[in-house]
Image (cartoon, rainbow, N blue to C red):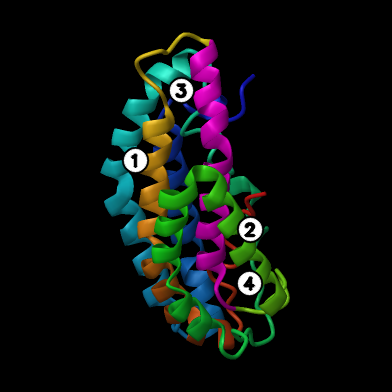
Amino acid sequence: MILGLATAAAAGCFEQHLLEAMALNSERRALYAEFSGGRSEAVSDRLVETERLTLPVARAFDRRAETFQRAGIAVMCAEFEPMSRAPGAPTQTAPMQTPPGLVEWVQEARLAVRFEAAYTEGGFAAAERLAGEVLSRLAEAEPRGKNGGLCMTRHLVESIRRVARLAPHHAGEADLLGFRWRSPERLSRAFYWLQVAALPAGLDLDVLAEPAHLAGAPIICSDVPPIP
């Protein structure tokens, strides 16, 4: 079975991913509030509201992907990791602190602008290389699981890397199947831009989560699955 298509029956894969994220974030809201003395509540509320507002966009992407998925091309399905692969039930941690200067580095790096330039100059291959460089920089500053910090930013960059990696594969499959006048590359490109546009809001969420992290609530960091 092609990766991801098993979840597409009831709802499209993008919509299903958001619904699972909404359920998880809603379920963990009270626990994180207990850990953090209420400091996490604004983060939980913003996560769920953002996901809810994104649902119509997700449904539109899923509709555009249906023709390709029926032909066995897993565009807009293989891009997502199941929420079941997020870390298990969260526990209160020692204070989690973003390494000094990391937020400023991300702000000064202007990641959305750099990803726009990378794609414009070198397509998906250049975008994938840039994502790898950014993730290496984040890993040097905060190894996964050892510090708090920019978990949403990391998640978005991991997602951008996967989109960039899969896009040529999807397009090649479409060529082999005879989609001569219609390619999933346009859909992959639109999803890439959606993820890139979300980077500033992702950093805002990371900054909003800092007080909860300092109180020992691993919100976001324990709620997103790693994307290899």
Q: Which residues are magenta?
A: 149-176
Disc 2 marks a residue whose amino acid type is Gly
Position of residue 48 measured from the top left corner of the image (x, y, whole percent): 37, 59
**Which circle's residue, 4 or 2, is located before the other in the chain?**
2
Residue at 45%, 80% in the rendered image: 108
**Which circle's residue, 3 or 1, is located before the other in the chain?**
3
Disc 1 marks a residue whose amino acid type is Ala
Disc 4 marks a residue whose amino acid type is Leu
- Report the residue marked by disc 2: 132
**Which circle's residue, 2 or 1, is located before the other in the chain?**
1
Residue at 42%, 31% in the rendered image: 185
Circle nearer the viewer, 3 or 2: 2
Q: Which mark is residue 138?
A: 4
Pointers 3 and 2 in contact (C-beta within 8 Å): no
- In the rendered image, the quadrant that contains the N terminus is top right
Q: Quadrant of residue 139?
A: bottom right
Position of residue 110 measured from the top left corner of the image (x, y, whole percent): 42, 72
Report crowding for label 1: few under 14, some 14 to 19, many 20 or more residues within 10 A (C-alpha). many
Position of residue 156 measured from the top left corner of the image (x, y, whole percent): 50, 58
* Measured Cα–Cα span from mark 3 to mark 4: 36 Å
- Report the residue marked by disc 3: 9
- Report the residue marked by disc 1: 58
Circle nearer the viewer, 4 or 2: 2
